[in-house]
Amino acid sequence: MNFAVVAASSQSQRGPAMIEAHRTDIIRKGSADEIVAKRDRALELYRRGVELLAEAAKVHKEVGATDYTNLRHVLVRETYSIEHGETDGAVNAMRRNLDGAVWNHIMNALGLINLMDAQEVKAFREQNEKDPAEVTRDNLVATFSRLTAESEVTFKRGVINLFMALDRSFASNPAYRLGDKLIMSGALSEYGGWNHWSNSQDQMRDLDRIFQIVDGQPTKDHRGDAAAMVAQTTRQSLGNTLETEYFSIKTFKNRNLHVKFKRPDLVAKVNRIIAEHFGEVLAHATRKPRRRAA
């Protein structure tokens, strides 16, 4: 509504400013009721919308086993479109958040995520965040039937991926099998904890997970596995030894990590998986030590 201030023509006539409405027809007969009715309807729709969003967020958290729905970021990002009647963008964004949470929860609940190595987990997380498959009955049944059937293959592939990534440049590290110990060079930060420029933390986590699985034990939470213990111990100082159920781990001030295996029977099981991949002949070969530069 536009208003103008009308001033008196002389100083003596000046008094309080008078406001004159240029559009007096806006409050025509019956228009007040129309304005109030539309205002009330807008407020009621907002109330219903907010209540529905709150209910949707609650169910989202339940089915996805998460405390974070990303609702705030979606609404901020899609506000302009929503105000102009375009709702597909917001709905699709929330669909991705919801389906991603559901797939993540089910993969963890069924233990299938524990069969993957760090590389596969990263790929799954990235795809699941970017564009997860729709959660439908057919998709659920098909996906988890396939993953369950392929669980052994997935686990063995994780073993091979880890083995290929490990540093075998030392004479004590056999070429096509695990020996009695493993050396991880540059694994630690000079200030303590893991060196995040390397993949050593993920490798230690995968190694611990693999030994737990071949031992028939449930996998540990990341907060209590061998990688977490190394991080906690080395923040205090380097040059110490720590013991876990499967490993004797010695840290060095040159930031290397020596992992000695305490269960030869489990090492043999892992080596059989490696042998299946490379062949029985290669499984008994040993890499010659590299020549050091003069």
Image (cartoon, rainbow, N blue to C red):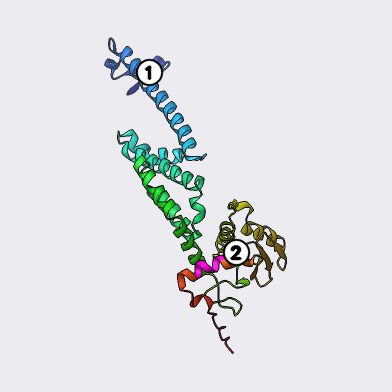
Residue nearest the observer in this picture, 36 or 142? 142
**Circles 2 and 1 in contact, beta carbons < 8 Å:** no
Amino acid under disc 2: Leu
x and y, in percent, of residue 257 in the image: 64, 69
Quick one: which residue is furthest to the top in this view?
29
Give the dominant element type of the magenta stretch: helix, strand or loop.
helix
Q: Position of residue 179 (x, y in %)?
A: 60, 73
Quadrant for the N terminus in the image? top left
Q: Quadrant of the C terminus?
A: bottom right
Name the front one of labels 2 and 1.
2
- Please name the residue shown 37% across and 37% down the image: 79
Q: Quadrant of residue 9?
A: top left
Query: Of label 2 and label 1, which has the lower sequence position?
Result: 1
State left or right for residue 241 relative to residue 175. right
Q: Position of residue 103 (x, y in %)?
A: 44, 45
Give the class, few, some or many, for how many residues have Cα within 10 Å of label 1's Cα (few <14, many ≥20): few
Give the SS element for disc 2: helix
Left or right: 242 as drawn, with respect to 130: right
Do we see residue 197 in this rendering? no
Q: Identify whether 68 is placed above or below 247.
A: above
Q: Which disc, if any, is residue 266?
A: 2
Magenta region: which residues?
Answer: 269-274
Cα distance in 3D space between marks 2 and 1: 71 Å
Give coordinates of residue 263: x percent, y percent: 64, 65
Amino acid, disc 1:
Asp
- Is 261 included in the stretch rendered in magenta? no
Q: Give the left or right position of residue 204, taking residue 93 as reference.
A: right
Task: Tell me if residue 284 can be seen.
Answer: yes
Residue 273 magenta-highlighted: yes
Picture quadrant where residue 194 is located = bottom right
- Numbered label attached to residue 40: 1
